[in-house]
Amino acid sequence: MRGVFKEVSLLLVALFLFSVLTPEPDDVQGHQSAAGIPALLESDAGDALCTGRTVTTGCPLQLGGLYDKEPRLVDRKPPAKGQSQAEWVKRALALEIMKDWQGLIDWCKKWTESDPEYAGAWGVLAIAYNELNRYNDAIEAYRQALRIDPEYTAAWYNLGTVYAHLNRYNDAIEAYRQALRIDPELALAWEGLGLVYFISGNKAAALDTVRELRCLDPARADKLFNVIVPR
């Protein structure tokens, strides 16, 4: 099912964190991650929802779990010693830009060893694993992130995309539902949920998600509807 589901880059959130920690945050507008997007749906979140490819969403505050919507830091403590979070984030972003996924894995392993209770580090590690098709490792890293922070919206959403890619549809539905429990207005999750329902044969439930999505993003809802009910 590769090319059907798309994963949100947690490094977008990390970039926002780094921009807050640097002297000139206005210079950092968002990181354009690599995205090879085929054409099942032509939109930002599910333009064909590519599993294993990170994309710019423009929603770092709502998706990451590092900040709430004010924005304010949500109980994220820097490591007691060693590198600052800004230094960890800056290097991680550089590795993602270079698409050095093994290098990012190696860096994030050091990051999680330095600060094992920092959910964001585990989330970025999961992204890197997923880019190398190491899906079981990605799932484990997302689970570690969610053990630390059960309200980590992006980790739930991304976990759903990995499960969907592996045809673990019930697990994907549960992960998307958890993301929507935290943020009922997360259009990406409604879209992913609708696709999972459709692919797994539950057309009625898929159409229910279209109705929910239409209140949030009518254009995205129309594209999802055209997948479920082709003309």
Image (cartoon, helix red, strand yellow):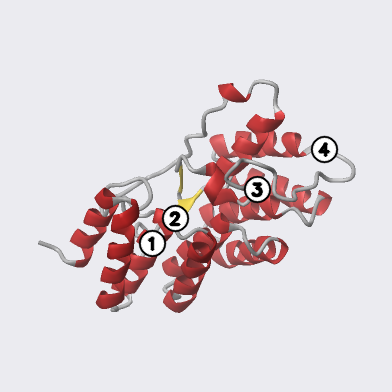
Marker disc for residue 190: 1
The kind of residue on which mark 2 rests is Leu
Q: Is residue 165 left or right of residue 108?
A: left
- In terms of sequence position, does the residue under pointer 4 or pointer 3 come before the other? 3
Residue at left offset 31%, top offset 75%: 205
Q: CA distance from mark 1 to mark 2?
A: 7 Å
Q: Which residue is mark 4?
A: 83
Q: Which residue is mark 3?
A: 66
Given contact means CB atoms under 8 Å apart, are the residues at marks 1 and 2 in contact? yes
Element type at marker 3? Answer: loop
- In terms of sequence position, does the residue under pointer 3 or pointer 2 come before the other? 3
Residue at left offset 33%, top offset 77%: 200
Q: Is residue 221 left or right of residue 190?
A: left
Element type at marker 2? Answer: loop
Up-down: is 129 above or below 73? below
Marker disc for residue 35: none
- In terms of sequence position, does the residue under pointer 2 or pointer 4 come before the other? 4
Q: Which residue is mark 2?
A: 186
